[in-house]
Amino acid sequence: MNSQDIGNNIEMNFFKFYTRITQVKLLGRVSRNVKELSEALANVPSASIYHHTHRYLEQHRYFSPEHPNDFSYWINNSLGLKKLGELVASLDIFQFRDIEDLRRELIKILKDYLVKTPSLRNCIPGEEFNFLSSRIFIIPTNFTAKNLEEFKDCIGKASIHSIYFHMFEARVRLKKGDNDFSYWLRTTGYPGLADRLSRFDPYTYTLEGIRRKIIEAVTQQMQSDAAHK
C-alpha cells in the first residue's frame, strides 16, 4: 500500500483509516561526542532523523518525556551537557514540514556549540549514540468514515498507531504538508475544522491527548451544525 492509494481514498469523500508497522534497522554509525554527532547528522538518511526525533511521540502515549528526542536525551545523559541537551530538547519540531530543514537546524545548534566550546567530551565506552533508521509498511484498518459522526466514532476506536500515522507520518514522512484528517475535512466542506486540526501542535500533547482534542473539536462542529439547522 502506498501514499497515492491513501490519497485516492480520501478524495472519494470517505476517510479510510490506515495504520502501519515499522521495521527498525541499525545503520552502523556511532558517535562519541558532539563533533561526531554533528558529522553523522549530515550524512545519515532522513528516515534516521525522523526516527530519532518523532518516535518518542508514539512511545509515550500517556505522558510527555522530559527529553522529547533521542539526541537531547543522549547529549544530556551520556555526555552530561545539560544546557546543550535542553537547547536541542526545546527545538520546536512542529515548525518543520521537511526533515531536511530539521536536519540543518540540528547541525547548526551543534556547530554553534562547537565554536564556543572547542574541547570535546567523549561519552564513556558503551554509551555511544547508535544511529537507527526505520521503514514503514502501511496497512488498511476496518475503520471508514463517511461523515463527522462516523469520523468521531472512528477516532475514538482507532489504535493510537493509526492516529499517529495520519497526524504525523502523513504530514512529514510522506511529505503531504498537512495531516490526513485536515485534508479530508477540507474536501468534505469543513475548512474551519480542518484549520483547527492543522493548528494543533501535537508535540505539546500526549497521543491520547491528541485523540481527545480531535474528538472535542469534531463534537463542537457537530453541535454547531445542529444549532444552525
Image (cartoon, rainbow, N blue to C red):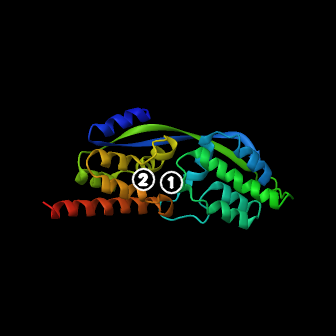
Q: Amino acid at mark 1?
A: Glu
N-term mark: 2 or 1: 1
Task: Work out which residue is located at the far right of the displayed protein and give it.
Answer: 119
**Which amino acid type corresponds to the residue marked 2 in the rendered image?**
Ile
Q: In the rendered view, would you say 212 is above or below 127?
A: below
Residue 61 in the image: x percent, y percent?
A: 48, 59
The residue wearing badge 1 is 58
Q: Which residue is mark 2?
A: 160
| Secondary structure at numbered mark 1 | helix
Name the residue rendered at 44%, 38% in the picture: 138
| Residue 157 image offset from top left, x and y in percent | 33, 53
Q: Is residue 179 above or below residue 202?
A: above
Residue displayed at 41% across by 38% down: 139
Q: Residue at x 68, y 39 (%)?
A: 27
C-alpha span from label 2 to label 1: 8 Å
**Label placed on residue 5:** none
Q: Is residue 47 above or below residue 155?
A: above
The crowding category of the residue bearing disc 1, from other C-alpha atoms within 10 Å (few below 14, some 14 to 19, many at least 20), is: some
What's the residue at 32%, 40% (across, down)?
Answer: 10
Q: Tags 2 and 1 in contact by the CB under 8 Å rule?
A: yes
Quarter that holds the C terminus: bottom left
The image shows residue 100 at horizontal and vertical percentages of: 61, 44
